[in-house]
Amino acid sequence: MYKIIDKKQLTPLIYSLDVEAPRIASSAKPGQFLIVRPSDNGERVPLTICDYDSQKGTVRIVVQIAGVSSNKICRMNVGDLLCDVAGPLGKPSDFMELPYEELKGKRYLFVAGGVGAAPVYPQAKYLFEAGAHVDVIIGARNRDLIIMEDEMKAVCTNLHICTDDGSKGEKGVVTILMERLAASEHAYDMCVAIGPMVMMKFATLTAKKLGWPITVSLNTLMVDGTGMCGACRVSVGGKTMFACVDGPEFNGYDVDFDEAMRRQTLYRKQEQEANAAAGLDFLVRK
């Protein structure tokens, strides 16, 4: 059992939880994820590690209410116990393979869509502390869905915010800001996009047009997190990969995003029925 020692509400549907997990905190690395079960009859929920503190023995997860199990996690409070927290799972970000001193002066651009700001944070933090130049774009539909703005400002060189409706930052989608940065003669050694699948698809197309290498995270496809269920199968470079054990991060140019988006809709009907049965009418699409 894993105790929740801190909880913050970031938006009406997004919560941050600090969980007591010393062994995970001591070995976690940017890019990895956890599998969380709120109760012994709950489903396995894959959640990217947002932050970790080996001295305190805690890990931070950011959870968006998207269904029955994520709602259960978000309704838990400080002092409550999560049934299972397994991890760290998946491969760390590629830059973790580089000697720390080689990261100094490297130029990285992170593109975060909505709750994607959570997995971006530990990567930006690690690189910024290593002396890299780190620019971050956070995009969302409106100002109420922007999260971790203050935390991100502390771990990046420049923070850019855009919203679809223009209620915060610049009006428009993240790809507009990507092109604007390129027009300002910004060159990047690597672009990393994390967020909704459609956002990562168009961020990849934009990066390709600009000549930037790009990494994307497919953590939203995962179910059991061990490669046994096969739910996260995706074509990468013409080969079948599993997001949980071969990723979750991949070269964006190689990902078949259309196939990945189709896979995300396979159980939409069952998800809608479960949300309706649980009284989560605000999640049921009309």
Image (cartoon, rainbow, N blue to C red):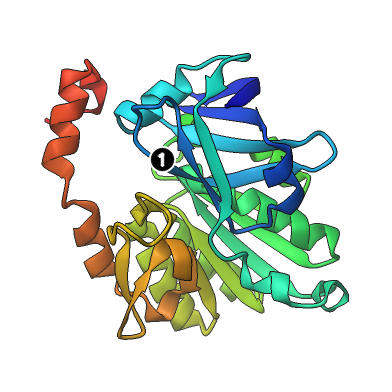
Q: Residue at x 64, y 36 (%)?
A: 60
Residue 271, position as x, y percentages in the image: 19, 36
Residue type at numbered disc 1: Val
Label 1 crowding class (10 Å Cα cut-off): few <14, some 14-19, many 20+?
A: many
Residue 63, position as x, y percentages in the image: 48, 34
Q: Residue 61 appears in which quarter of the rendering?
A: top right
Q: Check disc 1 and report the residue beneath it.
A: 45
Q: Residue at x 71, y 69 (%)?
A: 96
Residue 134, position as x, y percentages in the image: 72, 62
Residue 104, position as x, y percentages in the image: 85, 73
Q: Residue 199 appears in which quarter of the rendering?
A: bottom left
Q: Residue at x 11, y 39 (%)?
A: 269
Quadrant the N terminus occupies: top right
Q: Can residue 252 be seen by looking at this rendering?
A: yes
Compared to residue 209, the image places residue 38 above or below, namely above
The foreground one among 76 and 24 is 24
The foreground one among 117 and 92 is 92
Query: Horizontal placement of 50 versus 280: left or right?
Result: right
SS type, badge 1: strand
Q: Can residue 167 be seen by looking at this rendering?
A: no
The foreground one among 264 and 161 is 264
Q: Residue at x 39, y 30 (%)?
A: 70
